[in-house]
Each structure stands twice: as structure tokens, then as C-alpha cells.
């Protein structure tokens, strides 16, 4: 993805209609959090969400589930949805399809083991938004829905101002938007500023936050 591209490009929507970036459901907004679970950050996100009875979707890195199982359990026990973000945060463009596929399945096995009731369908978000057609096809055949986004906050970029991160979301999100934040150390400065304000702003506008 190009730097500072906040909205998911219409061309990509048209080229890859099966990749989900927006849901046509009235009155709802879909928050997603990538790269967790991470101690300190993920529990903070959960607290913010619970203040607004908001549900969200967490695209987890398998290796973080392995390292922080108690944080992962907390996400589940608070009723949020779990998605797959590969085991080692692989860049699809730089990895062969077979290896990429194995890495995703390794995470899926771990999710199923720790969360047998994880509702279907299986959801996968490619790290960096980078995935080859061959990888997307293989994952779709295996029953994964590929989830992209409508709006990305750029919270993970420490060079952007926290106010810009907030503006990215407020000015671009609409009904049915899938929004990307990151429950990671790197994003925490921008996330901690923007997330509470996003929750307040859209709640006051009458939207409900739902998981995918
Ligand atoms: Zn990621």
C-alpha cells in the first residue's frame, strides 16, 4: 500500500471483489485491530471498547498468541471476533505461496486449539496488505475470507501526528466501514489518542460498533 493512502483504492475493490473491505450493513462500523495480542496494549483496547459496548475483530499474529495466551483469552472472553494475521507477520510478496499458506494454517490451528468455538468463516488479513493472487486463491479454496479494509488509520507510523491519525478515521469512515488500528507497541501513541475519540464520535452519531 502506498504511504498515506487512507482509503482502500476503488481499483482494488473492482479487481478483487471477493476481498472484503466494506459491509453494506446500516448503522454499523467495524473496528479491527492487527498485530496483537500484546500485554498492556490489547487489554487497554478491550477496556476502551467495553466503555461503549463495542465489539471488534482482532487479527492476531500466531506467535503472539503463543507468547501471550492469557491476553488472547481475554479478547475471546470479552466476546470479540478473532481473525488470522499469519504466524510470523509474513509479507506475501516476499514469500512463496506454499510457505505463506503453511504459516497461516499454523496460526489457524493455534486459534482452533485455544478457541474451539471461534465462529466460521475463517478470516485472514494479509500483513502489510500484501498478498499474491496465488496465495489469495489457495486461502479462499481452504475456506478463508480475505479481509482488507475501507479505512486505515496509519496509527503504526510514528512519523504521523496523533491528530492526523484521528482525522484519517473521522473524515473517511462511513456506514459499513472496516477500519484498521493496531494493538501493538509501535502504534500505541497514536492509538491511545485516536481510539477513545473515534469510539465517542461515532457513538454520538448513532453508530454501533460490531465485529465482523
Ligand atoms: Zn500487521
Image (spheres, rainbow, N blue to C red):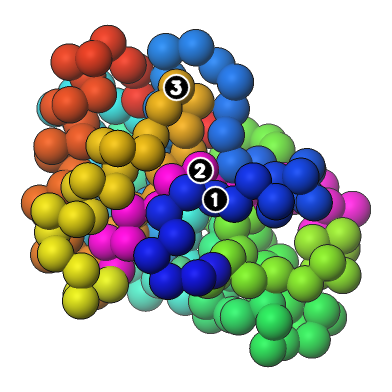
63 up-or-down from 36: above or below: below
Identity of the residue drawn at 20% across and 47% down: 166
Whole-Å distance between the Cαs marked 2 and 1? Answer: 5 Å
Q: On the image, numbered disc 1 is attached to which residue? A: 8
The percent position of residue 139, horizontal first and vertical second, equals 80, 59
- Sequence order check, earlier mark of 2 and 1: 1
Q: On the image, numbered disc 2 is attached to which residue? A: 150
Residue 153 inside the magenta-drawn segment: yes
Q: Are marks 2 and 1 in contact (CB under 8 Å)?
A: yes
Q: On the image, numbered disc 3 is attached to which residue? A: 175
Task: Point out the stretch of residues depicted in magenta.
Answer: 139-156
Closer to the camera in the image, 15 or 25: 15
Whole-Å distance between the Cαs marked 3 and 1? Answer: 15 Å
Residue 83 in view, yes or no:
no
5 up-or-down from 22: above or below: below
- Sequence order check, earlier mark of 3 and 2: 2
Q: For the residue carrying disc 2, how many other residues have a C-alpha within 10 Å: few (<14), some (14-19), or many (20+)?
A: many
The image's mark for residue 87 is none
Amino acid at each position: 500500500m502506498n504511504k498515506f493512502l487512507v482509503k482502500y483504492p476503488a481499483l482494488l475493490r473492482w479487481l478483487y471483489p471477493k476481498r472484503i473491505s466494506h459491509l453494506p450493513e446500516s448503522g454499523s462500523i467495524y473496528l479491527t485491530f492487527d498485530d496483537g495480542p500484546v500485554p498492556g496494549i490489547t487489554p487497554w483496547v478491550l477496556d476502551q471498547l467495553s466503555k461503549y459496548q463495542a465489539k471488534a475483530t482482532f487479527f492476531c499474529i500466531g506467535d503472539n498468541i503463543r507468547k501471550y495466551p492469557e491476553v488472547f483469552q481475554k479478547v475471546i472472553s470479552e466476546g470479540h471476533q478473532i481473525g488470522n494475521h499469519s504466524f510470523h507477520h509474513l509479507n506475501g510478496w516476499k514469500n512463496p505461496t506454499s510457505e505463506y499458506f503453511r504459516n497461516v494454517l499454523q496460526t489457524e490451528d493455534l486459534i482452533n486449539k485455544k478457541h474451539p468455538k471461534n465462529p466460521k468463516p475463517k478470516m485472514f488479513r494479509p500483513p502489510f496488505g500484501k498478498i499474491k493472487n496465488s496465495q489469495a486463491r489457495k486461502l479462499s479454496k481452504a475456506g478463508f475470507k480475505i479481509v482488507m479494509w475501507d479505512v486505515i488509520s496509519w496509527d503504526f507510523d510514528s512519523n504521523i501526528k496523533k491528530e492526523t491519525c484521528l482525522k484519517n478515521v473521522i473524515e473517511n469512515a462511513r456506514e459499513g466501514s472496516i477500519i484498521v488500528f493496531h494493538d501493538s507497541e509501535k502504534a500505541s501513541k497514536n492509538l491511545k489518542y485516536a481510539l477513545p475519540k473515534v469510539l465517542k464520535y461515532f457513538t454520538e452519531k448513532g453508530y454501533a460498533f460490531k465485529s465482523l
